Image (tube, helix red, strand yellow):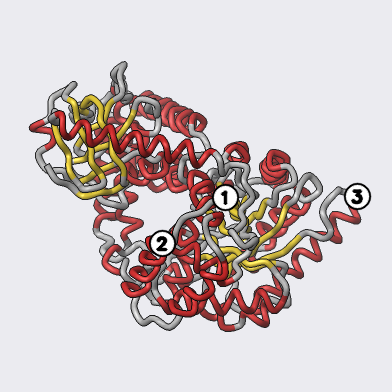
Amino acid sequence: MRGIIAAPGMAMASAHLVSEPEINVRKREISDVLEELERLRCALAECSSQIEGIMDSMDGSVDPQTIEILDFQLLLLEDTDFIGEIDSIVTGQSINAEYAVKSASENYMSKLNNITDNDYLRERAADVADLSQRLIAVLSGVDMEIAEPDEPYIAIGRDIAVSRVAVLDRDKLKGIILESGGVTSHCVILSRSLGIPCMIRTQGILGLANQGDTILLDAVSGEVIINPDLVRVQAYNDYAHKEEAKKTMLKEYVNRKSMSLDGAEMKVYANITMSSEAENVVHQGGEGVGLFRSELLFMAQTVTPPSEETQYAEYSKTAKALGDRPLVIRTLDIGGDKLISYMDIGEEENPFLGYRAIRYCLDHPEIFKPQISAIMRAGADGNVWMMFPMITCVDELIKAKQFVEQVGLDLREKGIPYDPNIKIGMMMETPAAAMDATILAKEVDFFSIGTNDLAQYLFAADRANSKLSYLNSPFQPALLRIINRISKAAAEAGIEVDICGQAAEVEALTPIWLAMGITNLSVSIPCVTSVRKRICQLDKADCVGLLEVVLNLETADEVEKVLIRFAERNIIHDN
């Protein structure tokens, strides 16, 4: 059978068919409304406990998007509209909580599915369905967890909720095959972050595969073979042997200096979301954290922002775990597709172009100043840097720096230890900032180029819209030319410049970043060693010539082909 490759790779193991628990939710009248509401409250608390347990079991290899998904479910359990509607149905109709949850969830999902111009919000309907099923299961006394076989297996289902996949034994789970699903579905996001091959829209797999069949999942060519013959098995064994050798080879780069053959250094940092990931950064040889996404601390709260002490504890713990490695903490980046219920941003027609990130924080010192204070205090415990998101003009940057100055004076007067010389940087993610890079470079210690948002704004193309993926390609010449402009401005000002975004992980682009003089690449934790390996194989002099060619090309296809030919043509050496 054929399907769509969602996460590349190959795996061979026993089939494990995963079905959603069958819970027959019937409407029934109740005599005691207060007792039913109390039963609902207990179920809400149990669901919250289960989801928190899932999150606690995750390690630093899990993609931040997966954490966001589960965080959203936790927030939904406290959402006054959602839970309020369930309460109203129970109270107004005197019916059982299970049916009220089902009814309220269907209404909520219907509203999300009817939003035709926002893929992100439509995908949240899957989160509502997942949480609804968990809540109904708790109310009904049904076990939601997947019973795993004792042997390695490939999970096969119609679509599997991310909260169910997240708790599976990763030593046994070798692959995922879905009959439905989309490339941005949450199960797929998790499989990518775990490095597990995944195929979707593999029509008919549930009707043809039996429990325990040997499954060859070939998410390289896009095939699924049930009970493969000896030729196929041998081909897979050859692939697995090469992959194991590759992993062994990459271990040699864990503690290697990120330096080209001719001595040009470009460090490899990691992107993280919480302090628990810092240990894994060190283990994988990350030379620092180029992006700590602080908004998850805020998204985890349901009524009020995290206190200064809560933030300081998290930042300090992370800094101490990293030792002398840099920890770049991005200040609160909300808005767009990251909404927090207790922050009244309001509905906007174009939220990605709206009241978000630094724009919101500059108007809310009661939120901004405690975060700045927590970051500066953590600077006394390690090598902490501060970074502002969504800066579009120098006025915004100067105002943000004035907050830092004010907070520093307050800390000094109170005698609280902090870093008075903390490095301050900004995200380069708007065309306006790129055009004024020379001016902005005089005001900061470093730039961090957010390639995902920069491409989105440069091409006026929503990065969550799959129909516009060709415009958000990191190979677009206009994107590379504007990044080159930013890197030149940084070099002239003598400040560091990072690439922070998916483009940092694209190995075909590594020669371009090296030639531009990019200081650091900030990537997901699993990619640290492979990106470092690529840097060590390059000669910067050759890359400079390549850059001159690429910057004069006209299409993304031309750029990609030239970079692939360069990779194939160059003999790989180790220094």
The residue at the point 8 percent across, 32 percent down is 208
Report the front residue among 368 and 45: 368
Q: Which mark is residue 415?
A: 3
Give residue 146's quadrant in the image: top left
Q: Position of residue 71 (x, y in %)?
A: 47, 42
In the image, taking residue 425 as reference, residue 95 lies left or right, namely: left
In the image, taking residue 320 as reference, residue 503 lies left or right, namely: left
What residue type is disc 2 on?
Ala
The crowd level at tag 1 (other Cα within 10 Å; few <14, some 14-19, many 20+) is: many
The residue at the point 70 percent across, 48 percent down is 325
Q: Position of residue 206 (x, y in %)?
A: 13, 33
The residue at the point 33 percent across, 24 percent down is 145
Q: Secondary structure at mark 1?
A: strand
Residue linked to disc 2: 567
Whichever of labels 1 and 2 marks the residue nearer the N terminus, that label is: 1
Report the front residue among 147 and 246: 246
Residue linked to disc 1: 270
In the image, taking residue 254 as reference, residue 18 lies left or right, namely: left
Give residue 281's quadrant in the image: top right
The quadrant of the image that shows the N terminus is: top left
What residue type is disc 3 on?
Gly
Whichever of labels 3 and 2 marks the residue nearer the N terminus, that label is: 3
Q: Position of residue 306 (x, y in %)?
A: 63, 46
Whichever of labels 3 and 1 marks the residue nearer the N terminus, that label is: 1
